Image (cartoon, rainbow, N blue to C red):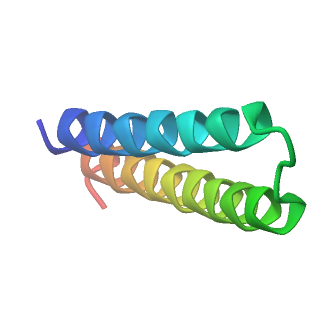
């Protein structure tokens, strides 16, 4: 249940960031610095989500192994 909630929250935030980058790129004079900041935040957010998923897998594996 918690994994599903975390996934929905992360995907909605990722979609919002992607949309913000898209809108910035459509401008006649896109701000490269803003796009860079948005993409840096996106990469960090995806890294945190990946680490969280790995941690959940490790915890689940420990429960199954009885450790």
Q: Position of residue 33 (x, y in %)?
A: 84, 68
From this view, report whether residue 31 is shown above or below residue 26: below
Q: Residue at x 55, y 34 (%)?
A: 19
Q: Nearer the viewer, residue 29 or 47?
A: 29
Left or right of 44? Residue 36 is right
Q: Quadrant of residue 9?
A: top left
Which quadrant of the structure image shows residue 38?
Answer: bottom right
Placement of the N terminus among the 4 image quadrants: top left
Q: Residue at x 88, y 59 (%)?
A: 32
Q: Residue furthest front?
A: 28
Question: As drawn, is 49 to the left or to the right of 5?
Answer: right
Left or right of 29 in this view: 38? left
Q: What residue is at 60 percent from the left and 36 percent from the top?
A: 18
Front residue (pair 28, 12): 28
**Residue 34 vs residue 55, the one in the foreground:** 34
**Total numbered badges shown on the rendered structure:** 0
Q: Is 34 above or below relative to 66?
A: below
How far from the left and from the top, in percent, is residue 46?
59, 51
**Pick the front one: 27 or 41:** 27
Using residue 26 as the reference point, say whether residue 17 is left or right of it.
Answer: left
Percent position (x, y) of residue 16? 45, 40
Residue at 82% x, 62% y: name it: 36
- The C terminus, quarter of image: bottom left
């Amino acid at each position: 249940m918690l994994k599903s909630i975390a996934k929905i929250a992360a995907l909605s935030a990722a979609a919002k960031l992607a949309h913000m980058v898209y809108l910035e790129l459509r401008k006649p004079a896109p701000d490269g610095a803003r796009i860079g900041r948005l993409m840096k935040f996106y990469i960090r957010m995806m890294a945190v989500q990946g680490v969280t998923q790995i941690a959940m897998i490790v915890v689940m594996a420990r429960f199954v192994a009885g450790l």
